[in-house]
Amino acid sequence: MEEQEKAKTGIRYLKIGYNKVFGYYIEVRHSGTDKVPAHYVRKQTLANAERYITEELKEFETKILGAQEKIVALEYNLFTEIRETIKERLGDIQVTARNIAVLDVLTGLAEAADRYNYVRPQLVPDGQIDIRDGRHPLVERILRRELFVPNNTRLNHSDCEIMLITGPNMAGKSTYMRQTALLVLMAQMGSFVPAGEAVISPVDRIFTRIGASDDLVSGQSTFMVEMNEVAQILKYATRNSLVILDEIGRGTSTFDGMSIAKAVIEHIAAKIHAKTLFATHYHELTDLADDKIRNFCIAVKEKGKDITFLRRIIPGAADKSYGIHVARLAGLPKTVTNRAERILAGLEEGELTRTETAAGQMLCSEEQPVPKENAGMASIFGGSLSDTLLQLDVMTMTPLEAINELYRLQQQAKKEAGLG
Ligand SMILES: Nc1ncnc2c1ncn2[C@@H]1O[C@H](COP(=O)(O)OP(=O)(O)OP(=O)(O)O)[C@@H](O)[C@H]1O
Ligand SMILES: [Mg+2]
């Protein structure tokens, strides 16, 4: 229309615009107003232009503005029409959607099975789980620099009901336990599993207590959440459940935690008989091993201060956690890890003398106690103090650390001499 009007009137600076107050208008610069035809009706004067309307423009405007309303009405009609049509076939559509979803899951599992070499698990009713060369379906995909190391899992109600898993930090305990739970879950939902071979008995539930999280909003502390979860597990787990307990008792003092952990294992072994995987850093718990509770650990190779994670789960108990080593790998300042090593050495010494005396007292409670002076002499010259001194790295200590250490040693010496 703008082009038409320009041609008809011969006005160069003519344009059609729109605003909310006047609607559509024709704008002509003052320089062209002498050419404006008689049927243009002036509506507004601006600094350098006049604005007009014409009958034709107003008709056009009604059409356009009406169209907007018509569009909305049309759209709404179409929408309700579709809604009515859908309503008639609602059941069919829902069934189809559900079937497509099932198909999607199954083809997804089939594709993963084919692509990543899964095997068909053999399902048996006798309560055993026997997985050869099992892998964690996600971790094995995510690892970049390392290859995933497959592991076996054998759980049953005759000679291995509870696996007590110890091993260094970062060794792969949590991965191994979750992998077992995932494989059982996958097998039970009808999937192939990432393993060399798998014999799996369906479970009634898989219970897990993993990781630290707190629920501050509902008024529960980290440890409270942990204990609540353990309480649920002990209440509802049955002989046919699979229970995964990753380091329970970690969120409180060592002795409290260890006592709870031990009592929980004993309860599961005596009352529940659920197949259980239990990872722990409390090496003291490995004493629980019997004909159904078995110790396993994850192998590492130690070379000087370095360790290599072999990721292989083997029978037996680990005796160290290598926590400080992992802290060093994570980049804690050297002063902190060195100091931690010294503290650890001190603690281990202390614990040694403590348990030794305790054992000694138990063994010879009827006999005369060892004279105080002798006990002091023995440990100063043959035992803990000199060992602690030998382990000090004097060259890397700050003066303040040295004074602290000296003070601590003196306190220890006083205690051992019976003066503390
Ligand atoms: N079988 C495996 N093969 C290769 N890499 C593995 C394997 N298992 C675990 N890893 C790697 O080791 C890392 C640490 O494993 P995980 O968290 O299971 O250790 P952890 O023993 O539970 O340690 P923490 O005692 O600190 O809890 C994983 O993130 C993974 O990258
Ligand atoms: Mg872990």
Image (cartoon, helix red, strand yellow):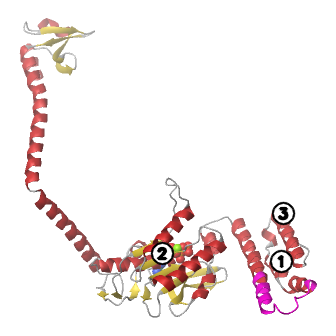
Magenta region includes residue 367: yes
Q: To which residue does mark 2 refer? A: 234
Which residue position holds label 3? 399
Q: CA distance from mark 2 to mark 3?
A: 52 Å
| Occupied quadrant, residue 254 | bottom right
Q: Is residue 237 magenta?
A: no
The dominant secondary structure in magenta is helix
- Residue range corresponding to the magenta coloring: 354-373
Task: Please state which amino acid type lies under the numbered disc 2.
Answer: Leu
- State the SS at label 2: helix
Image quarter hosting the N terminus: top left
Report the amino acid beneath label 3: Pro
Q: Quadrant of residue 344?
A: bottom right
Left or right relative to 315: residue 337: right
Question: Which residue corresponds to the image point at 72% horizontal and 66% vertical from the top-left?
Answer: 335
Verify CB contact (< 8 Å) between mark 1 and mark 2.
no
Quadrant the C terminus occupies:
bottom right
Residue identifier under label 1: 389
Q: Residue at x 44, y 76 (%)?
A: 178
Mark closest to the chain's N terminus, 2 or 3: 2
**Residue situated in front as seen by the camera: 125 or 279:** 125
Q: Where residue 32 appears, x then y in whole percent?
A: 17, 10
Q: Is residue 259 above or below residue 296?
A: above
Which residue type does callout 1 highlight?
Answer: Leu
Mark 1 Cα-neighbour bin, 10 Å: few <14, some 14–19, many ≥20: some
**Disc 1 or disc 2, which is closer to the eye?**
2
Camera-nearest residue between 415 and 179? 415
**In the rendering, at what x and y percent does residue 283 appear?**
62, 82
